[in-house]
Image (cartoon, grey):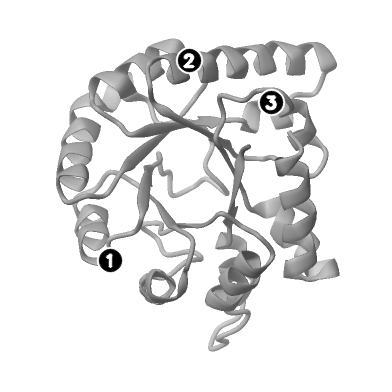
């Protein structure tokens, strides 16, 4: 049965939209998400600190009862923060200052050596490392070669696809990628762009052990509350 990791970045986005305001509080959102059944809490500490702040991650480390997943770029600054805070899992992601949200997977063909060094450092300190990658067998092969604990397959291109034919093509690639990663004994997660409608598409793809979902949950929470929004997504994920 797949797990649900709730990304609370956009709770902080609301807070940061106003100067000198300390609400809404990401820590409170994390507590409510866990009470509603979330299997983990995800935050992305970006270089430009556009939403989640370092103080949020430190506070969450003290409060989160399930597991704290820290998304971060493979930089010396972020490695130092991760080694200090010690999240339960680090997910390495690409980062572009101009992007509104993460636009694609980390290119391991281009950054293999840097990412390998980061994995060695973090896992040497007892922090499992996942890599956010596109559903490409070559990327998965490299992730295995450099000893990643798991991969998170990018589902955003599927969610954004404009035609049924394109959706089917991308879903097939995601399915093949998940099966290949599972065969290599990598942990397999998936995320980005998933919502209350698209999550049902992954029914039966048992190789995926966890879905990371944020924007759609936080958006629904604005209207119906965090606990209800998480409970509704939790029920959908557990039915897959």
Callout 1: few (<14), some (14-19), or many (20+) C-alpha neighbours within 10 Å?
some
The image shows residue 87, relative to residue 25, as above or below, that is above
Q: How far, Cα to Cα, is label 3 from label 1? A: 34 Å
Q: Which residue is mark 2?
A: 136
Name the secondary structure under disc 1: helix
The x, y position of residue 123, in whole percent, is 21, 43
Image side of residue 63 versus residue 211, left or right: left
- Residue 188: tell me if it is visible: yes
| Quadrant showing the N terminus | top right
Q: How far, Cα to Cα, is label 1 from label 2? A: 32 Å
Callout 2: few (<14), some (14-19), or many (20+) C-alpha neighbours within 10 Å?
some
State the count of labels. Answer: 3
User: Image point 39% across, 11% down: which residue?
Assistant: 138
Front residue of 74/147: it is 147
The image shows residue 142, relative to residue 217, as above or below, that is above
| Res 115 → quadrant | top left
User: Image point 20% across, 33% down: which residue?
Assistant: 114
Q: Which residue is mark 3?
A: 158
Numbered badge on residue 85: 1
Callout 3: few (<14), some (14-19), or many (20+) C-alpha neighbours within 10 Å?
many
The image shows residue 170, relative to residue 133, as above or below, that is above
Which mark sits nearer the N-terminus, 3 or 2? 2
Name the secondary structure under disc 2: loop
Image side of residue 83 versus residue 176, left or right: left
Name the secondary structure under disc 3: helix
Which mark sits nearer the N-terminus, 3 or 1? 1
Which mark sits nearer the N-terminus, 1 or 2? 1
């Amino acid at each position: 049965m797949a797990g649900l990791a709730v990304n609370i970045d956009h709770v902080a986005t609301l807070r940061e939209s106003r100067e000198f305001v300390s609400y809404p509080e990401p820590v409170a959102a994390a507590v409510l998400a866990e009470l509603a059944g979330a299997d983990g809490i995800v935050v992305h500490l970006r270089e430009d600190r556009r939403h989640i702040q370092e103080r949020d991650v430190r506070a969450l480390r003290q409060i989160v009862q399930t597991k704290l997943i820290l998304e971060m770029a493979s930089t010396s600054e972020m490695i130092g923060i991760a080694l200090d805070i010690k999240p339960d899992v680090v997910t390495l992601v690409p980062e572009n200052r101009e992007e509104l949200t993460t636009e694609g997977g980390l290119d391991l063909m281009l950054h293999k050596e840097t990412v390998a060094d980061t994995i060695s450092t973090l896992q040497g300190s007892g922090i499992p490392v996942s890599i956010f990658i596109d559903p490409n067998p070559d990327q998965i092969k490299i992730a295995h070669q450099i000893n990643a604990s798991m991969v998170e397959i990018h589902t955003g291109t599927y969610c954004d696809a404009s035609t049924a034919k394109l959706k089917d093509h991308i879903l097939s690639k995601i399915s093949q990628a998940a099966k290949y990663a599972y065969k290599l004994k990598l942990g397999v997660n998936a995320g980005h762009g998933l919502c209350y409608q698209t999550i049902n598409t992954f029914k039966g793809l048992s190789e995926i052990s966890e879905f990371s979902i944020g924007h759609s949950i936080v958006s629904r929470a604005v209207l119906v509350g965090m606990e209800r929004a998480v409970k509704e997504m939790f029920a959908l994920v557990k039915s897959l």
